[in-house]
């Protein structure tokens, strides 16, 4: 539910296929704590939604998708920490996440 809310806050729209929405890769921008949800949501609307609303250009969609994935990671991690939990190690800023299909085999079978 949180991921859907963040995605709709940043880039509400009508997407018709996976190719319209999902870029080849997302670059992680590092963790930024979300301390004030109201201010953060307002900032997302100002930075992403208002200037890009109804712009279906592929480069704009890729940019917004990247921003959305990073914001979702920040919100989830912040919520986890606010619940008194430790995050452990986070991936490094600049890590690229691709949608390339891979098969991973584990030692010992299947």
Image (tube, rainbow, N blue to C red):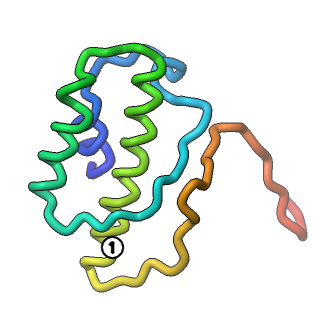
Taking the spot 25% from the left edge, 27% from the top edge, the residue there is: 12
Label 1 neighbourhood size at 10 Å, few (<14), some (14-19), many (20+)? few
Give x and y (percent) for residue 106: 83, 64
Q: Is residue 58 above or below residue 89?
A: above
Taking the spot 38% from the left edge, 18% from the top edge, the residue there is: 15
Give x and y (percent) for residue 85: 36, 83
Q: Quadrant of residue 7?
A: top left
Out of 5 and 94, give the one closest to the viewer.
Answer: 94
Give x and y (percent) for residue 54: 25, 15
SS state under label 1: helix
Q: Quadrant of residue 39?
A: bottom left
Quarter of the C terminus within the rendering: bottom right
Image side of residue 84 versus residue 63, left or right? left
Q: Is residue 37 above or below residue 46?
A: below
Give x and y (percent) for residue 101: 72, 38
Image side of residue 32 versus residue 51, left or right? right
Name the residue beneath numbered marker 1.
Answer: 80
Image side of residue 44 versus residue 98, left or right? left
Taking the spot 61% from the left edge, 47% from the top edge, the residue there is: 97
How many marks on residues? 1
Out of 4 and 95, give the one closest to the viewer.
Answer: 95
């Amino acid at each position: 539910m949180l991921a859907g809310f963040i995605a709709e806050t940043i880039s509400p729209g009508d997407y018709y296929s996976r190719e319209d929405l999902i870029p080849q890769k997302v670059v992680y921008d590092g963790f930024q704590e979300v301390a004030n949800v109201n201010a953060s949501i307002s900032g997302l609307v100002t930075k992403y939604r208002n200037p890009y609303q109804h712009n279906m250009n592929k480069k704009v969609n890729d940019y917004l998708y990247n921003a959305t994935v990073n914001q979702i990671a920040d919100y989830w991690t912040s919520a986890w920490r606010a619940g008194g939990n430790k995050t452990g190690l986070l991936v490094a800023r600049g890590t690229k996440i691709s949608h390339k299909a891979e098969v991973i085999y584990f030692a010992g079978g299947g």
